[in-house]
Image (spheres, grey):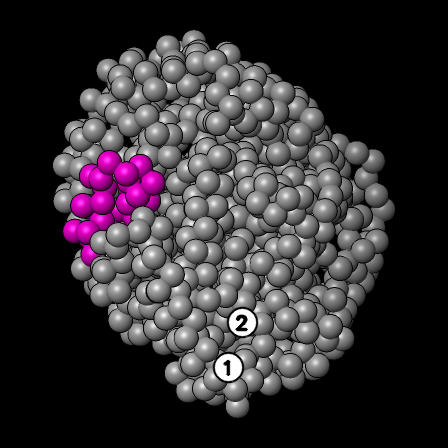
Amino acid sequence: KEKKKITRELVQTVLARKPKMCSFLEWRDLKIVYKRYASLYFCCAIEDQDNELITLEIIHRYVELLDKYFGSVCELDIIFNFEKAYFILDEFLLGGEVQETSKKNVLKAIEQADLLQESQNEEWGGSSEDIL
Amino acid sequence: MEKNINLRNCQTLNTYVMLTHLRMPAPIRLRELIRTIRTARTQAEEREMIQKECAAIRSSFREEDNTYRCRNVAKLLYMHMLGYPAHFGQLECLKLIASQKFTDKRIGYLGAMLLLDERQDVHLLMTNCIKNDLNHSTQFVQGLALCTLGCMGSSEMCRDLAGEVEKLLKTSNSYLRKKAALCAVHVIRKVPELMEMFLPATKNLLNEKNHGVLHTSVVLLTEMCERSPDMLAHFRKLVPQLVRILKNLIMSGYSPEHDVSGISDPFLQVRILRLLRILGRNDDDSSEAMNDILAQVATNTETSKNVGNAILYETVLTIMDIKSESGLRVLAINILGRFLLNNDKNIRYVALTSLLKTVQTDHNAVQRHRSTIVDCLKDLDVSIKRRAMELSFALVNGNNIRGMMKELLYFLDSCEPEFKADCASGIFLAAEKYAPSKRWHIDTIMRVLTTAGSYVRDDAVPNLIQLITNSVEMHAYTVQRLYKAILGDYSQQPLVQVAAWCIGEYGDLLVSGQCEEEEPIQVTEDEVLDILESVLISNMSTSVTRGYALTAIMKLSTRFTCTVNRIKKVVSIYGSSIDVELQQRAVEYNALFKKYDHMRSALLERMPVMEKVTTNGPTEIVQTNGETEPAPLETKPPPSGPQPTSQANDLLDLLGGNDITPVIPTAPTSKPSSAGGELLDLLGDINLTGAPAAAPAPASVPQISQPPFLLDGLSSQPLFNDIAAGIPSITAYSKNGLKIEFTFERSNTNPSVTVITIQASNSTELDMTDFVFQAAVPKTFQLQLLSPSSSIVPAFNTGTITQVIKVLNPQKQQLRMRIKLTYNHKGSAMQDLAEVNNFPPQSWQ
């Protein structure tokens, strides 16, 4: 419930920003860094001592990863494959920190994990598309 | 061969499974559900679909269906993302985690991270599964376990599994090693005592070639150094190695794997710079060792894209924080100066933030960029404007006050309402410190009052009044300007309050046309009373303002000659006012006319020049004197003699060694006169005559202008003649339109006491009434809460409630506070509890 409230409040605040404004805003005792891609906003909350500009790069790196994985990612890709978006995020960040700085390595890990999933599902009869 | 047999068995098994489910239709697919939900045209329609599907999922869970469990949980997660409750899936996640299938584990762990947290006891059941999976033969399963633990592991889980994590930190598998490092960071954050056990594993972390491991290792080292001074000392020896790694990154050629816009692994560079900052802080040798590389990064990094600037930014922060040589510091500030001119507003924002941090230590260097900073006041972005404003105030000094004030006043005129209060306060402070002349000072105050009069903070009013009182030669000019200002418009309360007070004090100067500074205006006594009465009647006037007006009218009874009867009439009317405050005043003033007429002229004498207890920090104190009296400088004649005696005695007691005869600023000063002796024994030293208090009060009678802390039980010294400067304020609470800010004051001679002034403001469109602020602190502290200035937080940030908290912290422990707020808002009773944890270190160290 608290999460819902936070999400709602944050969404309202970010959507209220005009295009000419900078990508950072203060919210509670955190800094929010957001970047807009077409109709999607990617928001990231960081602490006082974190570097806002590199956070922008982190957001961009994540979007690049999604783009490579889905092939020209669009909003619908993320909606219909949200669990994969999470899996990719979990290979890029862990506990709020970057775990892998090489785009290639992140994508390789995802690929291999997907393969593992596929091969296991085939063993049991059926593809992963049948499972989920 | 074997594989084929297995497949056949599985197929048979699968068929069997499918047959048993023939009667029950398979649960709808995830993507199908998503598609269906998205066709809903109304919120109600969507809710209906969700409820239907949840019911289906619930019965599916009840049947312990293994095949489709992950599908059902995945759907539940989607619905959870939309905001619907999904708690009934928590146990199912655990079952998925325990499954042998990778798909199940993936969804199960994801579900655990999204649905579970340490508040549900259920999460502890995961511990064993995670333990097993940390030792799984497949690295991706191990990865899932590490990820989940590092994301939402509770302290108990961390304690149980820290050993496993430590093991994996030493593995040669870089895929797992990097995850283990970040998992260790989380463990340390949750259970700091476990930090020691990871120390051995950190030995050759930096020898890795793999960037992922390097990056996470640097993060782990950073975390350890930040938390433990011993670790910090231990890891200082890594500085040369870090410098080498950084150098390689910069000097090495193009590396496609890590390249971002021509820069090699900016993420790693930034993290190394940050670790260097922590290691070099307060340490000359380390700082020297990193000097060259910092200069290199600062000069060689490409600045055309954000990524280069991100590195420069981190470099600047590091240079400013370590013991760098002055050349390097100047280089850093110049980089910030260049940032200010960058087209990218993000860069400008970051520059302003950094300059704000350095303005205290490198003041002159920052001054060079003053004009650029002032230009940023005109920026469109709110955050940039705010920082530019704060920085501008920090840069104001005696040399640039005139020019800066022009810009700041212009800014005050045109800025958003949320800034006006802070800007006004800042202008007052700056004007007070650096005013080139009294006339300029008064003019500046007037300008602020008339342009942003309704945003001026409540505490500014007594400050201004005191200022005006002390500008003796400007009285006539001031009262004339104030009178003219409110003639046109008496809706801005602070302006009206100050004006009313001045008119009450100096009304005689006004009607006698004595102004030297400008053309004196022709005003009659009746006209003056007209305006004061209008203020009294007006619906726009607050109760406080009315109090000022009534008292002003009363004072004029000794300054005016022809209209005393009119004044008497007004006063008697308000004797039956509904407003209790006004009524009391009116009744007392009436008494003054009737029974105590002989004392009237003495009681309503002109206020003498007051000496102010100087503050030298950017924080402002609001001192309430323990009464709910919002206008502490109001003259309030006591209804009977003995009362001021006892008040004065209290003051004497508290002021300890000072052998001054104190004057209670809330009481009028009295002339030793024949009667009313009981009032005057204490005030005998003051030699007041009917003349305006141009004759300064003799030096042996310094009077406290600000109402003193009558209830100061913690220190018997006169408070805050030596204030520790510059403790940053914090926003302690901000929710539902209610914002509470804490400003701090500490005395250098009594550092165990921290005085916190809270200011509560309300940005909603309705007042918050019956506002009560309560606070609690841990047992090692002592707390004293003084009375608040009022119990109403007016809407639209038009005013604040201020209240003073005194905290005794003899053990210099980290300040923490729990606050409870109760108030009425929009017809309902509101209550909230919150914890304040963001006290700046300067407030308690």
Q: Write the residue at 40% across / 68% down.
A: B8
Q: Is residue B426 magenta?
A: no
Q: Which amino acid, by three-letter code, is at mark 2?
A: Lys
Q: Is residue B166 magenta?
A: yes
| Residue that mark 2 sits on | B75
Q: Is residue A32 above or below residue B406?
A: below
| Residue that mark 1 sits on | B57
Q: Residues within 10 Å of mark 1 (few under 14, many from 20)?
A: many
Q: Which residue occupies the foreground of this view, B212 or B4?
A: B4
> What's the chain of the residue with tag 1?
B
Residue B308 image offset from top left, x and y in percent:
54, 23
Q: Write the residue at 65% across / 66% down.
A: B764
Residue segment shown in magenta: B161-184
Q: Earlier in the sequence, mark 2 or mark 1?
A: 1
Image-based side of B429 in relation to B838, left or right: right
* Dot 2 and dot 1 residues touching (CB under 8 Å): yes
Q: Write the residue at 22% across / 39% down.
A: B171
